[in-house]
Amino acid sequence: MRARDRVAVSALRATLAALDNAEAVPVGDAGARGQALEQAPVGAGATEAARRELNEGNVVDIVRAEATERLEAAAQLTAPAHAERVARLRAEAAVLLRFLDGHGTR
C-alpha cells in the first residue's frame, strides 16, 4: 500500500466515524427510558433506534470540520520534532478538502 493511500484511508475512516456519530440519536431521544423492566420491549432489534438522516449540507459541514480540525492541530504543532505529524495532518486535510471541491465555501 502506498503511503498516500494510508493517509487517505486514515482521513476517510475518521470522517466516516464522525458522520456515523452525527447520525446517532441522543440518548434522551431513544425512548423507553424510565420504563419498568417488565414493560420494556424484548427481542432482537427491540433496542434499536432510528438514525438521523443527514442532508448534503450536514455532510459537507462535517467533512469541512474534520479538515479544519486537522489544519488547526497542524498549526499548533510548531516543534521540529512534530514535522512528520504536521505533514500527515495537512495531507489528511487535503484529502478531505478534495471531496468538498464543487461545494464552494460557506
Image (tube, rainbow, N blue to C red):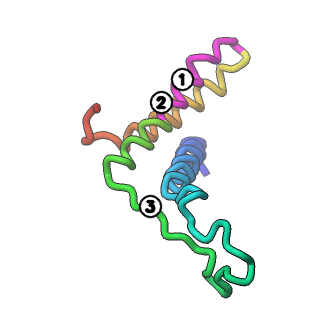
Q: Residue at x 54, y 70 (%)?
A: 49
Residue at the disc numbered 2: 68
The image shows residue 104, relative to residue 59, as above or below, that is above
Assess disc 3: are there few (<14), some (14-19) or many (≥20) residues with their C-alpha within 10 Å of its C-alpha: few
Magenta stretch: give its range: 67-80
Q: Residue at x 69, y 12 (%)?
A: 79
Q: Is residue 62 magenta?
A: no
Assess disc 2: are there few (<14), some (14-19) or many (≥20) residues with their C-alpha within 10 Å of its C-alpha: some
Q: In the image, residue 80 lies at what x, y percent?
A: 69, 13
Q: In the image, residue 29 lies at what x, y percent?
A: 53, 60
Contact (Cβ within 8 Å) of mark 3 with mark 2: no
Please state which amino acid type lies under the numbered disc 2: Thr
Element on which disc 1 rests: helix
Q: Which mark's residue is nearer the viewer, 3 or 2?
A: 3
Contact (Cβ within 8 Å) of mark 2 with mark 1: yes
Q: Residue at x 39, y 41 (%)?
A: 61
Q: Which mark is residue 72?
A: 1
Please state which amino acid type lies under the numbered disc 3: Arg
Q: In the image, residue 78 lies at what x, y percent?
A: 64, 12
Q: Which mark is residue 104?
A: none
- Residue 79 lies left or right of residue 76; in this view the side is right
| Spatial CA span between label 3 and label 2 | 24 Å
Element on which disc 2 rests: helix
In the rendered image, the residue lying farthest to the bottom is 43
Which quarter of the figure is the C terminus placed in?
Answer: top left
Q: Which mark is residue 52?
A: 3
The image shows residue 33, relative to residue 65, as above or below, that is below
Please state which amino acid type lies under the numbered disc 1: Glu
State how many labels appear.
Answer: 3
Of the pair 99 and 3, the residue shown nearer to us: 99
